[in-house]
Image (spheres, coloured by chain):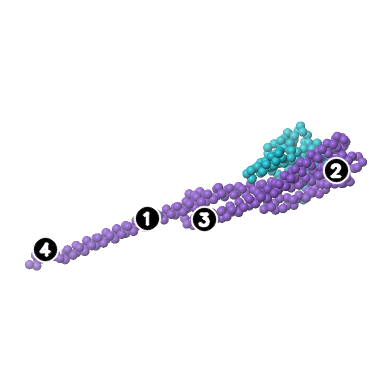
Amino acid sequence: MAKDVKPTRKNLMAIEDRIELSERGHGTLEKKRDGLIMEFMDILDKAQDVRGELSEDYDEAQKKINMARAMEGDVAVRGAAAALQEHPEITTESKNIMGVVVPQIESSRVSKDLGQRGYGIMGTSARIDEAAEAYEDLLESIILAAEVETAMKKMLREIETTKRRVNALEFKLLPELYEGQEYIEQSLEEQEREETFRLKKIKEKKEQEEKEEAEAEEAEEAEDLEGGQAPPVGSAAGGN
Amino acid sequence: MSQEIAVVGSSEFTTGFRLAGVRRFENVPDDQKGEDLDDAVTTVLNDDGVGIVVMHDDDLEHLSRNVRQNVETSVEPVVVTIGSGTGGGGLRDQIKRAIGIDLMEEDEDDNEN
């Protein structure tokens, strides 16, 4: 890349501007990456708590439904499950964490009372009610886990992108710009040295010429002088 | 826009969720998971009306590479796996890749101690 640029002062100034901008961008992106990682750490702590709860709720719900199956039979449990009228729904709103849009999930109709479930009180036993309740709790935990895990995934993606940008600036763009700057500076210095050398040579040549000219003039003058003191032989003889 | 919760897995796994009111479910018998689970998961992931997909951790083993990758990275809908308690397996790798260190490792060690 460095050899592609023309070594001119204009290009040097342009590269210096780009270096300044890139260094500033690099600093800002580094800060963004560190901030995102700190936010991510908070979410990770929360996620681990939620995961723990989710696991406990799942074990509990499994226990309850196994008990219901054992006592009432699989068909009765399936029958009750098929009779449900109210269905849980979720709506998603968004929240912004350092430029990352993370969802906030609101749920409705997850926890229901006996009357709302729709399978009736007479045909089923309390075991099924307990299992349904345990699964409703589990659903609440799942919704919370979904919210936290989506936030984590989005944050991770953003961290990865920011990290890649920081690395690209640090290890690719900036070194190339520095190399270009150095190349132009060295070329300009070289040009300057050549120019000085050329001027020096011209000056020397000029001095040499002047010297030669002066010597030639001196020689001429000396010759003239010699000519004036001793008049030509022919003219003296002619006079006599 | 309101969305629904979907459950994918064997009928034993989905029954409990149906008892809690979940009506969007894909039943895949254990012996057909190798062939049918990919399609079931893809159908649910492509459904705009679904906001959260619930799966069992062990079922991830039956998914093909591409579908599994979609499951691990999908944000809309988000896939929540339950069962082994450690959470999304892909998430750990993603954290390792993005942050540079394995943040979940020390917690597992703590749990063991």
Q: Residue at x 71, y 50 (%)?
A: A102
Mark 1: which secondary structure?
A: helix
The label nearer to you, 2 versus 4, is 2
Q: Which residue is mark 4?
A: A233
Q: Write down the residue under mark 1.
A: A197
Q: CA distance from mark 1 to mark 2?
A: 96 Å
Amino acid residing under circle 3 = Glu
- Discs 1 and 2 lie in a common subunit: yes
Query: Which of the marked residues, 1 or 4, is nearer the chain's N terminus?
Result: 1
Callout 2, which amino acid? Leu
Residue most toward the top?
B31
Q: Colour of chain B?
A: cyan
Q: Which residue appears at 26% of the width and 62% of the height?
A: A214
Q: Is residue B56 left or right of residue A129?
A: left
Using the image as rendered, state which of residue B56 and residue A79 is in the foreground: B56
Report which residue position mark 2 lands on.
Answer: A84
The secondary element bearing badge 4 is classed as helix
Lower position in the chain sequence, tag 2 or tag 4: 2
Q: Which mark is residue A229?
A: none
| Nearest to N terminus: mark 3 or mark 4 | 3
Q: Earlier in the sequence, mark 3 or mark 1?
A: 3
State which chain is coloured purple. Answer: A
SS at mark 2 in the image: loop
Residue at (74%, 38%) from the top-left corner? B84
Q: Amino acid at mark 4?
A: Val
